[in-house]
Image (spheres, grey):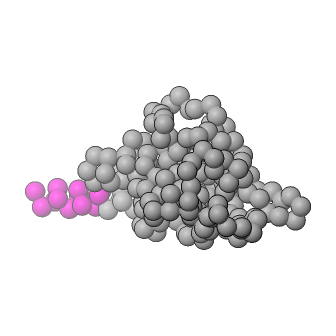
């Protein structure tokens, strides 16, 4: 019995080491390519959570970029895999990537429609392919939306990175989404940028 316990313990440790996200080789370019492909046409191999499919979409892209599923804990509440809370809910997804060391915070930017602001926002100079942008669209401190950086480009001396997203479906639009703010009633919005660790 003691020997069986030791064998199971060794297998458990090996599994934990072999499937940890840190051991994965994440490709931001691969994730961005997936996001561009499925921004408008949904991947039929995954469930859709419309009208709230943004985190599910970004999770699919991150997985396509090489970040592995993480199977752990109680069904849906722990781990990161299709259908889990950390896969399909942007609040839980951000907490998972940010608080467990699987991403690096790249900066934030506040927007208030009633005030003038500098364009492009300073966060845009830090974003790269496959990075994730989280949006607090109501100023209440709760993440409401998420997108993925899918195109890096400059226009008129400005660096204007583009994103793809679901809910509402967007293909290579400026990452701050200010052109689409009429979709929301916004008094104050904050953006947060993160990269995923390779």
Residue 92 falls inside the magenta stretch: no
Q: Quadrant of the C terminus?
A: bottom right
Residue 72: percent from the left, percent from the top? 32, 53
Q: Nearer the viewer, residue 93 or 10?
A: 93
Q: Nearer the viewer, residue 60 or 55?
A: 55
Residue 24: percent from the left, percent from the top? 52, 58
Q: Nearer the viewer, residue 176 or 111?
A: 111
Left/right placement of residue 167 relative to residue 85 reads right
Q: Residue at x 67, y 67 (%)?
A: 115
Residue 2 falls inside the magenta stretch: yes
Residue 3: percent from the left, percent from the top? 16, 59
Q: Residue at x 75, y 64 (%)?
A: 120
Extreme-right residue of the structure: 156
Q: Quadrant of the N terminus?
A: bottom left
Extreme-top residue of the structure: 44
Considering the whole magenta stretch, tell me its main secondary structure. helix
Q: Residue at x 56, y 32 (%)?
A: 43
Left/right placement of residue 6 relative to residue 136 reads left
Q: Can residue 169 be seen at all in this image of the molecule? A: yes
Q: Nearer the viewer, residue 89 or 198?
A: 89
User: Where on the picture, by quarter, is residue 18?
Assistant: bottom left
Q: Which residues are magenta?
A: 1-12
- Residue 187 vs 164, above or below: the answer is below
Instruction: Give the mark count.
Output: 0
Residue 14: percent from the left, percent from the top? 35, 59
Extreme-left residue of the structure: 1
Q: Residue at x 56, y 62 (%)?
A: 188
Q: Can residue 20 be seen at all in this image of the molecule? A: no
């Amino acid at each position: 019995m003691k020997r069986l316990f030791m064998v199971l313990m060794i297998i458990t440790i090996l599994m934990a080491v072999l499937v940890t996200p840190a051991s994965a080789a994440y490709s931001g370019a691969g994730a961005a390519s997936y996001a561009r492909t499925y921004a408008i046409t949904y991947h039929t191999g995954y469930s859709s959570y419309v009208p709230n499919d943004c985190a599910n979409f970004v999770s699919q892209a991150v997985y396509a970029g090489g970040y592995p599923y993480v199977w752990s804990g109680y069904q849906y509440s722990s781990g990161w895999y299709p259908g889990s809370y950390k896969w399909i809910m942007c609040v839980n997804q951000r907490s998972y990537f940010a608080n467990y060391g699987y991403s690096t915070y790249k900066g934030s930017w506040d927007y208030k429609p009633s005030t003038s602001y500098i364009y492009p926002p300073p966060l845009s100079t830090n974003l790269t392919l496959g990075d994730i942008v989280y949006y607090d669209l109501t100023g209440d401190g709760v993440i409401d939306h998420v997108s993925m950086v899918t195109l890096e480009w400059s226009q008129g001396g400005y660096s204007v990175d583009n994103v793809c997203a679901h809910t509402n479906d967007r293909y290579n639009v400026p990452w701050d989404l200010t052109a689409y703010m009429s979709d929301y009633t916004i008094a104050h919005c904050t953006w947060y940028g993160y990269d995923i660790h390779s």
